[in-house]
Image (cartoon, rainbow, N blue to C red):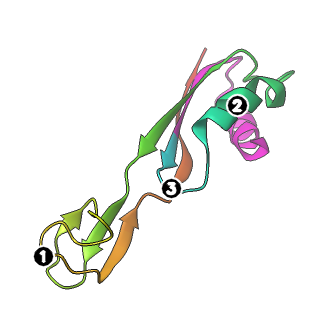
Amino acid sequence: MQNIIGIIDAEAEKNSFARVVEIRLAVGEVSGVIPQCLSDFFPIASKGTLAEGAKLVSNVLPVTVRCNTCGAEGKPQNAKCFSCGSSDYKLVSGREFYVDSIEVE
């Protein structure tokens, strides 16, 4: 959470804004980050900062894999490729966690 506040402070210094209205986060489905915990802790972590009172929105990004056998990309089904049934695939997305956008005044 402190990293999020740090990003906001750095952006405020570069772009001279007075207040943050909304912070949009991208949270991968298997990132280990729990959006509800972020929402619960954010008011405490942002107290006394430019982000105090801002709305925190977490957009959950789904898991996507690329099959090493057939090359198909999509969501795995029962730990297998949805297209050919192979279990030889690579995680393409779903681990992300970053600040996607900041709405300011």
* Measured Cα–Cα span from mark 3 to mark 2: 24 Å
The tag on residue 96 is: 3
Q: Is residue 64 left or right of residue 58?
A: left
Give the foreground label among 3 and 2.
Answer: 3
User: What amino acid is at disc 3?
Assistant: Glu
- Which quadrant of the view contains residue 81? bottom left
The tag on residue 5 is: none
The tag on residue 84 is: 1
User: What amino acid is at disc 2?
Assistant: Ala
- Which quadrant of the view contains residue 74? bottom left
User: What amino acid is at disc 1?
Assistant: Cys
Q: Can you say which quadrant of the picture contains the N terminus? A: top right
Determine whether label 3 and label 2 are within 8 Å by CB.
no
Give the foreground label among 1 and 3.
Answer: 1
The residue range painted magenta reads: 1-25
Q: In the orientation shown, which residue stands out farthest toward the right?
A: 48
- Residue 14's spot in the image, x, y percent? 68, 36
The disc, 3 or 2, on the residue closer to the chain's N-terminal end is 2
Q: Is residue 30 left or right of residue 85?
A: right
- Residue 13's spot in the image, x, y percent? 74, 34
Q: Which residue is mark 2?
A: 12
The disc, 1 or 3, on the residue closer to the chain's N-terminal end is 1
In the picture shown, does residue 74 fall above or below 35?
below
- Residue 85's spot in the image, x, y percent? 17, 76
* Measured Cα–Cα span from mark 1 to mark 3: 26 Å
